[in-house]
Amino acid sequence: MEVLKLVNINKSYKNKSNSLQVLKEFSMNVNLGEIVGIVGTSGSGKTTLLNIIGLIDSDFEGELYIDDVNISSCNEKKLAKLRNQKIGFVLQDFALIERYNVSQNVELPLIYSKIKRKERRKISQKYLEKMGIADKADSKPSELSGGEKQRVAIARSLATEPKIILADEPTGSLDYKTTDEIMEVLEMLRDSNRAIILVTHDMNIAKRCDRIINIDKLSL
């Protein structure tokens, strides 16, 4: 089942003297139950693409559909709601807030959804258990290993039960063993009928995806 569709996306960065086109006539369809690997050299537009899909950057030409919703018809309030409900983010640097404990970090997207504290804690515990780190709920991020931090980040990305997970170099700062463990987690999420879009520079990681899109060849 298709959950994401991009049609003829064009994106340029402009200043007073010149214009740099990063994406040109880029189209892509993504279905639930698959991992799509995005590869390309530095500066090829991988992060720009994720920002567009993640509804962070709406200044582009072309059409983007998320769950059959054309985002061009959405105002900022609706875009924020769509982002919170449909999309989870997993980043290379984990993006955890150090002053919060693990459970509070996982609960953050639920606060924006105005879910009550008791229910937030219950949901947080559920996904920490799925990630195998429920015992770390009261720990601070500084007390965790890199792999544990990424599992917290993945639990947070799942808190609102989104259909799409955007993973930007999710194994980039991890060792080989931990990388394998995180990929197994992402494969588990795919098998639970989610769409995973994974940006990576590591072809060994890309080969574990169901499809590979080389953005160098398709966007320039």
Image: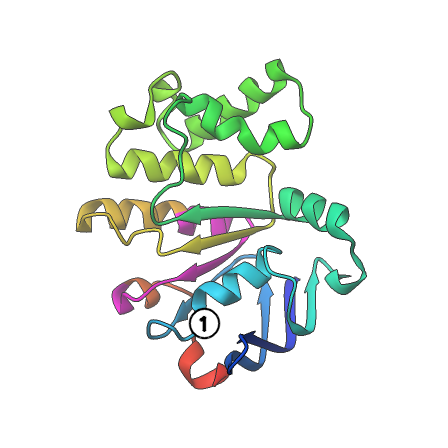
Name the image quarter holding the N terminus.
bottom right
Going by the image, does 94 lie left or right of 202? Answer: right
Counting from the top left corner in percent of width and height, residue 164 is at 57, 52
Q: Residues within 10 Å of mark 1 (few under 14, many from 20)?
A: many
The extreme front residue here reads 16
Q: Amino acid at mark 1?
A: Gly
Counting from the top left corner in percent of width and height, residue 165 is at 52, 51
Q: Could you say which quadrant of the image residue 111 lies in?
A: top right
Q: Could you say which quadrant of the image residue 38 lies in?
A: bottom left
Give the residue at mark 1: 45
Q: On screen, 2 above or below 129? A: below
Give yes or no for residue 198 being in the magenta stretch. yes
Going by the image, does 100 lie left or right of 175? Answer: right
**Range drawn in magenta:** 186-204
Q: On screen, 217 above or below 59? A: below
Counting from the top left corner in percent of width and height, residue 55 is at 62, 56
The extreme left residue here reads 176
Residue drawn at point x = 61 percent, y = 16 percent: 117
Q: On screen, 73 above or below 191? A: below
Counting from the top left corner in percent of width and height, residue 192 is at 53, 46
Residue drawn at point x = 44 percent, y = 68 percent: 46
Residue drawn at point x = 46 percent, y = 35 percent: 155
Going by the image, does 136 lie left or right of 20? Answer: left
